[in-house]
Amino acid sequence: MNFKVDRLPFLNELNKVSRAVSQKTPLPSLAGIKIEARDNTLYFTGSDSDISMYSYLKSENNNFMLEIMEEGSIVLGAKYICDIVRKLESNQVCVEIMDGQLTRISDEYSDFKINGLKSSDYPTIDFSKPDKSILLNGFTLQRCINQTIFATSDKETRPVLTGINVKANKGKMEFVGTDSYRLAKKIISVHEDTNFSVTIPAKTLEEVSKTIESDEVMEFAVNDKKIQFWIGNTIIQSRLIEGAYPETSRLIPMSFEYELTADSRDLLSAIDRASLMKEDGKNIVKLRLTQDLVELSSKSQMVGSVKEVLNEAAFQGKDLDISFSGKYAYDAIRALECDLIKIKFSGEMKPFVITGCNDDSCIQLILPVRTYA
């Protein structure tokens, strides 16, 4: 294998697929990136066996320089190849297999030689496309991910809660994340009438969100074993999380007796300040709601207390005092990306719902906590 390529496009593809590579793997080849040079194209593969990324680099319309003098393939340590190419100073880089797996990476000023592995040692990954697929705009998918992923659990005791459940039915897609203390749901309309229900690891969706750089149409393909995202010149493929996802629709109250309307920036700022009064790492805040007063407070026996009056907020209903996690509320309000939000309550110890005043496609639900002070 011997090729010359513009450094920045080459580095971008290496950095992209390296995000799927784990340095903590019993298979040495999976700590590397497989690079193939054939058909005037460079192909890149990175995987940790759970998530795999495949991309290609092809010079079209003379956007950049790529010259393949000899076809071939090699597996190079992800950390080393990325760091080397990043630190080279020339605009172009040369990669050549010299002797066996010894690979030369050079530019006008530097000459590196690193040991690679045979591409035949790299596990075979099936990138065939699943049957069921949906077309989505990139930023639409990215927003669905960002508005739900924070609510997933980071505890492996219930693996199914570490992912986002995605359902498609009758022209609708529903994204749900929960850790059993809070819930985030986003619903969008799609053109395809495809039916499925899968749970996708949060780690996979984080990588998908990072990879999306434009609002171009991308493809979402799935079967009962794997999920694929076709984004530009890149395929991101992942296993699915096994097990039945909990039925979350029954958790959302059907009726509400109280309603608070507030500017999201004012409320976020107040929660942020109130959360300074942490105790044992927990930031519990309390809302006192009356027709004449909307007050946010927090106190710690060890630190002190704080009270804030939200003069611009409007409340409807009987008097209500409710306590909850400041972090959960902050995350939920920020994810909505709305200037004006609506918080609907059913009672002091019942879950409450946060939505945008002009957009109810995203629902954030939080469980209150009991306080004794």
Image (cartoon, helix red, strand yellow):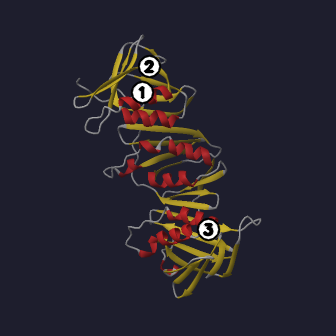
Residue for badge 2 = 310
Question: Mark 3 or mark 1: which comes first in sequence?
Answer: 3
Q: Nearer the viewer, residue 113 or 326?
A: 113
* Circle 2 SS class: loop
Residue 73 visible in the picture: yes
Question: Mark 2 or mark 1: which comes first in sequence?
Answer: 1
Residue 346 in picture, x, y percent from top left: 39, 22
Mark 3–mark 1 CB contact (< 8 Å): no
* Circle 1 SS class: helix
Task: Using the image, determine if residue 273 lies above or below residue 317.
Answer: below
Task: Using the image, determine if residue 144 lies above or below residue 130.
Answer: above
Residue 134 in picture, x, y percent from top left: 61, 50
Q: Nearer the viewer, residue 247 or 325?
A: 325
194 displayed left or right of 313: right
The tally of labels here is 3
Residue for badge 3 = 10
Amino acid type indicated by mark 1: Ala
Q: In which image quadrant can residue 173 be found?
A: top right
Mark 2–mark 1 CB contact (< 8 Å): yes
278 displayed left or right of 131: left
CA gap, disc 3 and disc 2: 52 Å
Residue for badge 1 = 270
Amino acid type indicated by mark 3: Phe
Residue 197 in picture, x, y percent from top left: 49, 48
Residue 268 in picture, x, y percent from top left: 45, 30
Numbered tag placed on residue 68 in the rendering = none
Q: Residue at x 69, y 68 (%)?
A: 58
Crowd tier of the residue under label 3, counting other residues whose Cα lies within 10 Å: few below 14, some 14–19, many 20 or above: many
Mark 3–mark 2 CB contact (< 8 Å): no
Amino acid type indicated by mark 2: Leu
Residue 367 visible in the picture: no
Q: Nearer the viewer, residue 132 or 260?
A: 260
